[in-house]
Amino acid sequence: MLSPPPIRTMSTSALLALLLGEEAAQRLAGRSLIDVFALHAGRTLLNEVHAGYGPERTLEACKELMARALAETMRLGDCLSDPATIRDYLRLIAGGLPHEVFMVLLLDAQNRLIDCVEMFRGTLTQTSVYPREVVKLALERNAAAVVFAHNHPSGVPEPSSADEALTRSLKSALALVDVRVLDHFIVAGTATPVSFAERGLL
């Protein structure tokens, strides 16, 4: 009996057929994988492919497993030693959302991930963030440091003056309880997430 070909050598259409079945793979033929995995905000390609939840749930499950694998990596060591891992993780969980969310990555004293919590959810263009609730969460989870992240459904990851002011306010509030703010990322579709620390905005 012939052994199956290595996954890495299979065509995109063959991989999609393996996950979703031949019919769905044919309907997706020639389409961008960015669209297939809904990595752009507001994309609804999967609704065109299947009215039920089969293919959509399968691809969402793939994304979730990839995100969990990256989170496991960040729990094993200093997650800031490899910023690409954080960026990939944030892109997977927030890059394609059609609404704004504000997330807090809680870290221990060795900068290992404790948890990532979506704290606030907003509209297409804004989210209300309450520093008191962020401080409360950090204390409850015994975090030594935090990394903030939020998404821009517009697809443009540039920080606004309001984003900068919010970061300063949160940093001041957390300093009172000895919790360090190490970075703030802005995620927007498949664009490289922008780091406040790298921009000198912290």
Image (cartoon, rainbow, N blue to C red):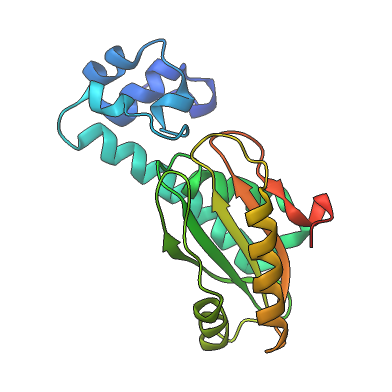
- Along the line of sight, which residue is nearer the eye, 140 or 42? 42
Name the outermost residue toward the left. Answer: 52
Name the outermost residue toward the right. Answer: 200
- Along the line of sight, which residue is nearer the eye, 100 or 33? 100
Does 172 sit above or below residue 97?
below
**Number of numbered discs visible in the structure rendering:** 0
Can residue 109 be seen in this snapshot?
yes
On the image, the x and y values in percent for residue 139 come to: 57, 87
Residue at 58% x, 66% y: name it.
105
Can residue 82 be seen in this snapshot?
no
Residue at 67% x, 89% y: name it.
177
Residue at 56% x, 39% y: name it.
188
User: Going by the image, does 168 lie left or right of 51?
Assistant: right
On the image, the x and y values in percent for residue 23 come to: 22, 17
Residue 122 quadrant: bottom left
On the image, the x and y values in percent for residue 47 come to: 24, 28
On the image, the x and y values in percent for residue 120 come to: 44, 64
Residue at 41% x, 32% y: name it.
37
- Along the line of sight, which residue is nearer the eye, 93 or 29? 93
Residue 81 quadrant: bottom right
Residue 168 quadrant: bottom right
Does 110 sit above or below residue 189?
below
